[in-house]
Image (spheres, grey):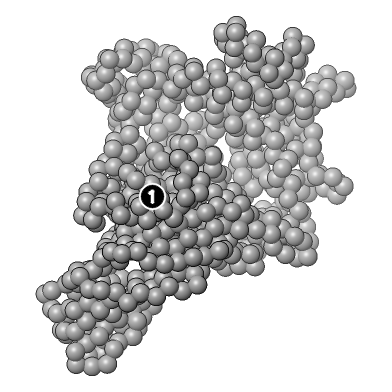
Amino acid sequence: MSPRWSGACGASADDHRHRLTSGVAGERVENEDLVNLPNWTLLRYRRLPDDGPPGDWLTPDSGELRHHGVRLDLRAGVLTRHLLFEDARGRGLRVTHIRLVHMGDPGLAAQCTVFRAYGWSGSIEARSLLDGAVTNAGVERYRHLDGRHLTDHQAGFEPGGVAWLACRTVDPGVGIALAVRTVTRPARPAREEATRTGTVQTYRLPVVPRRSAMVVKTLALHTSTDRPAADPLPAATGGIARAPEFSRLLATHRAAWQRVWEQGELHAPGEAGRILRLHVFHLLQTLSPHTAELDVGVPARGGRWLADHSRLQRHVGSAVAFNVWRYAQATCDRGFLHSAGAEILLEVARYWSGAAVFDPALGRYRIRGVVGPDEYHDAYPDAPAPGIDDNAYTNATAAWVLARGLDLLAELPEARRSELAEQLPLDAAEIARWEDVSRRLYVPFHRGVVSQFDGFGELAELDWDRCRARYGDIRRLDRILEAEGDSVNRYQASKQADTLMLGYLFRPDELRALFARLGYALDDEVWRATVAYYLRRTSHGSTLSSLVHGWVLARQKGADAWRYCEEALLADVADVQGGTTGEGIHLGAMAGTIDLVERGITGLETGPEGLRVAPVPLAEIPRFAFTLCCGRHRGVRLRILPGRLAVRVPASPEGPLTVVLPGDRRVAVAPGQERWFRL
């Protein structure tokens, strides 16, 4: 699916965030949106029977609706909608919509609508609309924010049933052009009308029983950000002139999806497997081959205005550096690591070196005034300034980044190291400071567990039983306490995994080594106590929280691992947060569930030594299979069964793939070979 589209072959949104300023609670608030583009899918229709007056316009909300079914073909990326209408005289009309957004060509989409009459003859009046008067108003609780992102509309027609619409976004002024070709069967001329913000094409199509009528809308979309740069309107009209008919578009779209699925398949039994396939689909259509070069992201959602201290979440820099390192390890892409990757990772390390301040009383470095992954605690109780000190996750990951920066500098070719030393700059004193800070950053503990931040253990204990008895669902504990005139900053209560995120990023042996470098002992007993401590004090106000807790518990074979894994799986299909799915899927949580199976339960790590596999069996997912890339090997397939593992490496000129099994047993699987192992 194209990066310009949002949802399963449905409503459109462009690939940029755009800003508008709104007045909220006396404050001027700047909000960013993924802008809803003009709606090209609109098709209105009604009966014109030979033996009576025209019928009402038919919609899914119509009183004449007798059946409404929707089917999403995950393998083909095709959305099909079936509707059956019947009036008081028994005159039936079956309508089938088939919609696709082309996976092979990011600028094309199409919708085929078929009408079949039952028990009557006459005509269908069909109006094909291109509507530019759309706003970002799909979420009721955000409707007080300005959602009018489109301006300067122009509309018109070209020969061959083509309607076009051009406009631009208010800020930053991205030009947008859509060209829609409407074709009918039987072919009929259209009555065309251009409005201030769109177009209308009206057709009259004869229908009789056993003879259907069809309307096909094909869209070409271009923006001023496309590369190579071009005027969007001529690009759109030229694109629609070259677009093939619907049957050809459907065939090439299916073929493109097949190629994508071959690289991203995941098979698991039962309901969990079906949900995972849905999650893979959403991930593949969003992170498609067309998005690789886009510099885009999805912002967090916001509601009524509150003071925003999210800028203090400095740990995000460590996450970027972590991904750079993991990507290079998994792909063996040293070219990236030594070029752009080195610049990113070393700059993050430089930041942490500068942010750490030595405390003579502790004999350690401290990082003050931050907000951790928890997000609830953005200040100490009654403190005049935001931020907390020495968040354990922030400090530990900062130490990790500094250590990896030192490793990277050691492996860089001399010429590249000298170039970066001058560019950043880095001198011997700075590198020595990295070594010192990476070994002496402060990580607080209290009562035998790792503290979320300095002073966390001194906060009040929350009466969790009282809150649950009074409110039931306490996921948004911050809002509950705020409504009571209280603040979550006063309590040992977390919105989501914070300290336990360390157990998500690092294997137990890696985490022990990281703390050992800092001079702390983190054995299994301390870590298990830490996990148990925070499990009792987390409200899981984020869909990602249950995912992380499920991962951490699976790694230590905890009894409740599946409960948290299942909650993460159901986050969207069951809308466990009570309404947030309707505002947009939680793509991060979906990706996390896939990662939980493919890396967490499998115990999979990829790196220069090869493919490390150490499965953690879960009875609820006893067997599954998926494909992955490892180093230069593409399409490596793993099959996990109770007590058994199969590794298949596709034929290629590459050398054998090294597989590291539990107990550090190393085996080689040659290209073109599949091998089975007992675990």
Q: Is residue 651 left or right of residue 540?
A: left
Q: Residues within 10 Å of mark 1 (few under 14, many from 20)?
A: many
Residue 294 lies left or right of residue 359; in this view the side is left
Q: In the orientation shown, which residue stands out farthest toward the left?
A: 210
Percent from the top left, x then y, of residue 189? 25, 74
Left/right placement of residue 470 relative to residue 182 reads right
Residue 517 horizontal/vertical position (percent): 67, 16
Q: Nearer the viewer, residue 514 or 585?
A: 585
Helix, strand or loop status at disc 1: loop
* Occupied quadrant, residue 601: top left
Q: Is residue 643 visible?
A: no
On-image quarter of the C terminus: top left
Identified at 78% across, 57% down, the residue is 486
Q: Position of residue 547 (x, y in %)?
A: 51, 42
Q: Which residue is depicted at the point 54% across and 39% down? A: 295
Identify residue for label 1.
Answer: 107
Q: At which x and y percent is residue 594?
A: 42, 39
Q: Residue furthest top?
A: 414
Residue 475 or 147: which is nearer the viewer? 147
Seen at 37% across and 20% down, the residue is: 632
Tell me the residue at 22%/77% (across/down). 205
Picture quadrant where residue 477 is located: bottom right
Q: Nearer the viewer, residue 372 or 42?
A: 42
Instruction: Examine the rendered structure and indicate whether residue 70 appears above or below residue 543.
Output: below
Report whether residue 672 is seen: yes
Q: Amino acid at mark 1?
A: Gly
